[in-house]
Amino acid sequence: MPENHKRPPPRPPLKELIGVRRTKYPDMEQHEFAKLLGITRLHMTAIEMGRRTPSTELALRWLSLLAPQARLDMFGPLPVIEERLGLLKKLQKFAPKTYAA
């Protein structure tokens, strides 16, 4: 019998990230900030409310606009980035001299 696919558990809203955005750009509306990111307001809202996960590129654009207050962990778990960081750590163990260069 085929295994039933279940949706992942809902993610909480990214309140800390929203707070940083509102603090850094207090007079900017959502659609204006989304335009700076190069996405629609609905896409941005879906990410902030935890309904979608941003791509690596989008998360980095977001962080650059909210620097230095924003941190990568404000987006919650990002499996793609966490996997790449894990691979980099493994590479550092195998070739520390190459990694230092």
Image (tube, grey):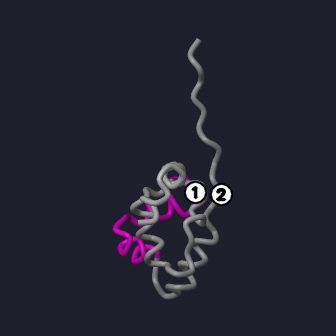
Secondary structure at numbered mark 1 = loop
Q: Is residue 82 visible?
A: no
Q: Nearer the viewer, residue 22 or 89?
A: 89
Q: Quadrant of the C terminus?
A: bottom left
Q: Position of residue 12 (x, y in %)?
A: 65, 57
Up-down: is 43 above or below 6? below
Describe residue 18's horizontal placement relative to residue 88 as left or right: right
Up-down: is 38 above or below 55? below
Q: Are the residues at dot 2 and dot 1 in contact (C-beta closer than 8 Å)?
A: yes
Q: Residue at x 46, y 83 (%)?
A: 28
Q: CA distance from mark 2 to mark 1?
A: 5 Å
Describe residue 40's horizontal placement relative to residue 17 as left or right: left
Q: Is residue 35 magenta?
A: yes
Q: Position of residue 15 (x, y in %)?
A: 63, 69
Q: Is residue 83 magenta?
A: no
The three-letter amino acid code for the residue at tag 1 is Gly
Q: Which residues are magenta?
A: 30-52
The residue pinned by badge 2 equals: 12
Q: Position of residue 58 (x, y in %)?
A: 41, 63
Question: Crowding near pointer 1: few (<14 within 10 Å), some, many (20+)?
Answer: some
Res. 50 mark? 1
Name of the residue lying farthest toward the front: 97
Q: Position of residue 99 (x, y in %)?
A: 45, 60
How many numbered discs?
Answer: 2
- Based on the displayed image, in which of its 4 quarters is residue 98 positioned? bottom left
Q: Nearer the viewer, residue 64 or 52?
A: 64
Give whichever of discs 2 and 1 has the lower sequence position: 2
Q: Magenta part mainly helix, strand or loop? A: helix
Q: Residue at x 56, y 16 (%)?
A: 2
Q: Residue at x 56, y 62 (%)?
A: 75
The three-letter amino acid code for the residue at tag 2 is Pro
